[in-house]
Image: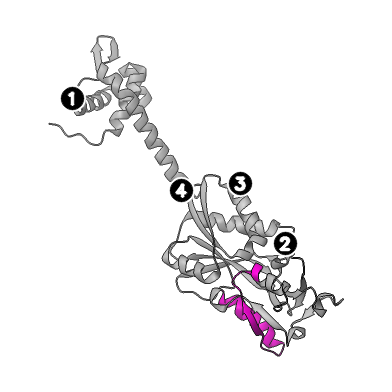
Amino acid sequence: MDRPDLPLPQLHAFVVLAEELHFGRAAARLGIAQPPLSQQIQRLERRVGHPLFSRAPGQVALTPAGEELLPAARGALALLADGVSAARAVGEGRAGTLRIGFAASLALTALPALLRRFRDQFPAVRLHIQEMTTTPQLAALRDGSLDVGLVREPGEEPGLEFHTVLREHFVAVLPAAHPLASARQEFVEAAQLAGSSFVLPPRRVGPGLHDQIVGLCTDAGFVPEVAQEAVEWLTVCALAQAGVGVSIAPESIARLRLEGVAFRPLATGGRTTRVAVAQAHDNHSPLLAQLQAVLAAAALEADDDRGEAVG
């Protein structure tokens, strides 16, 4: 028995002939001559095992077998067209799934503008968003369970690349009763925090930012005495509110606006903390390029953000 190739061209020819019921018009629609069209139909009929058309002089009509096949053939061609369209959209970065990790503090700065703009521009893209501190994000990027991370102060990481999109200044986080909370000076000097107990995130969750904060203190002539560690900045601020200690944080943390906590600009000599998009070197998804462009634009246009956006 003849074993034809996969019958997608034959199905297409069949559907066009079923709509035209005329070999000449169907061949013209398909852009082929009548003999190749007849051959396609004959191959399909051999595959089915029954005639699909009755052919009387000057008249072509579907047989009962042809009438049964027609909706399935149309459905198969439509499904293929949908699949091709979906594959093209993914290849062009207009559809697909993007798994994003983010540091919690970014919900107070770049993240909302990023998500709003990205969803507006690419509504067919599914976003899986997970709150993670920097170190777990980097591990997830390396093992492929995240596509992109939004991290603070990343260092050199084998297999990963980073694109800076935002820089922030620092603030001192103080209990409302602290003398510096009500001082009239424009900036708090890091040296003025010497002798205070500190509340900081543990180094393991974000080594770069932790080392930068400790470096601000050591440059001012003291090593901070850490009385308590807390993974989340909200908890850090709550502990400051309770009088456990003071802290130094990225300025976006001041948006928490907790009663009983004062946030004062810290004099750092121009030093800032950076936020970067992180991805694996070998992840070439077109969605990542789209996200990077949207994130940079969102950061630039966040007019209520005091941070310095970087393209």
Q: Amino acid at mark 4?
A: Val
- Callout 2 touching callout 1 (CB < 8 Å): no
Cα distance between the residues tagged 4 and 1: 39 Å
Left/right of residue 180 with respect to residue 23 in the rendered view: right
First reached walking from the N terminus: tag 2 or tag 1: 1
Q: Which residue is situated farthest in the front direction here?
A: 242
Q: Amino acid at mark 1?
A: Gly
Helix, strand or loop at mark 2: loop
Tell me the residue that label 1 is attached to: 49
Left/right of residue 296 with respect to residue 24 in the rendered view: right
Cα distance between the residues tagged 3 and 2: 21 Å
Range covered by the magenta-colored residues: 206-235
First reached walking from the N terminus: tag 4 or tag 1: 1
Q: Position of residue 208 (x, y in %)?
A: 58, 77
First reached walking from the N terminus: tag 3 or tag 4: 4
Q: Position of residue 130 (x, y in %)?
A: 53, 59
Q: How many other residues sit within 10 Å of disc 4, few (<14), some (14-19) or many (≥20)?
A: some
Helix, strand or loop at mark 3: helix
Q: Residue 9 is drawn in which quadrant?
A: top left
Left/right of residue 264 with respect to residue 155 in the rendered view: right
Cα distance between the residues tagged 3 and 4: 17 Å
Q: Count the marks: how many?
A: 4
Residue at 73% from the left image edge and 72% from the top image edge: 241
Q: Amino acid at mark 2?
A: Asp
Give the foreground label among 3 and 4. 3
Tell me the residue that label 3 is attached to: 120
Tell me the residue that label 4 is attached to: 90
Q: Position of residue 235 (x, y in %)?
A: 64, 69
Asked whether 213 falls inside the magenta stretch, the response is yes
Q: How many other residues sit within 10 Å of disc 2, few (<14), some (14-19) or many (≥20)?
A: some
Quadrant, the C terminus: bottom right
What label does residue 305 carry, if any? Answer: 2
